[in-house]
Image: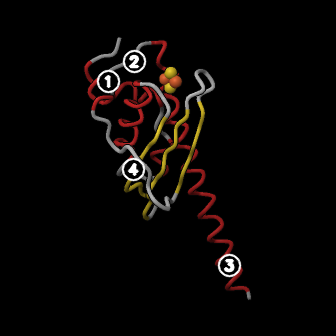
Amino acid sequence: MYNQKVLEAFAHPQNVGEIENPDGEGTVGNATCGDIMKITLRIVDEKIVDAKFQTFGCAAAIATSSTATQMVIGMTVDEALKLTNARVVEELEGLPPQKIHCSVLAEEAIKKAIEDYRAKQQNKTIDKSKIEYV
Ligand code: FES
C-alpha cells in the first residue's frame, strides 16, 4: 500500500513531540476520519527554527507530518504558508489515493500555528504601543 519512502518516514518519524512555550501552535481535526494533529513552532526573526508534531493519525499522517516539519524548518513563515500537502506528498513520492486526506492535517496545522504566531505578534505590538502611550 505504501512506498518505501513513506514506510521509512513512518518507521523513523522526525520532530515528534511538543515545543515548550511555542511561538505558534495549531491543532486541527481531520473531517474525513476524525484524527487529530498538533504542531508547535519555534520562530526567530520570522524564520522557523524548530517544528514538532503530535498526532492521533494513521501511518500516512505520521509520515507526512514528519516530512512537512522537516521541510518547514529553515523556511520563513511566509514560505511555510505556501507549503501544500501536495508538495509534501510529492516529497514522499506519492500516497495511495485514499490516504491523501491524511496529508492535509500537517498543512492545516502548520497554517494554524502560523496564524497563532501572527496573533501573538499582534498582541505584543498592541501591548508595546499601550506602554509607550501611557
Ligand atoms: Fe485519519 Fe489518516 S486515516 S489521518
Question: Is 45 situated above or below 53?
Answer: below
Query: Residues at badges 2 and 3 in contact (C-beta under 8 Å)?
Result: no
Question: Is 31 situated above or below 126?
Answer: above
Q: Which residue is mark 3?
A: 129
Q: Nearer the viewer, mark 4 or mark 2?
A: 2
Residue at 25% across / 19% down in the picture? 4
Q: Nearer the viewer, mark 2 or mark 3?
A: 2
First of labels 2, 1 by sequence position: 1
Residue most extreme to the right: 134
Q: Which residue is mark 4?
A: 75
Disc 3 residue type? Ser
Query: Residues at badges 2 and 1 in contact (C-beta under 8 Å)?
Result: yes
Q: Which residue is mark 2?
A: 95
Mark pair 2, 1: CA separation: 8 Å
Q: Which residue is mark 1?
A: 6
The N terminus lies in quadrant: top left
Mark pair 3, 1: CA separation: 48 Å
Q: Position of residue 119 (x, y in %)?
A: 63, 58
Residue at 54% across / 41% down in the picture? 109
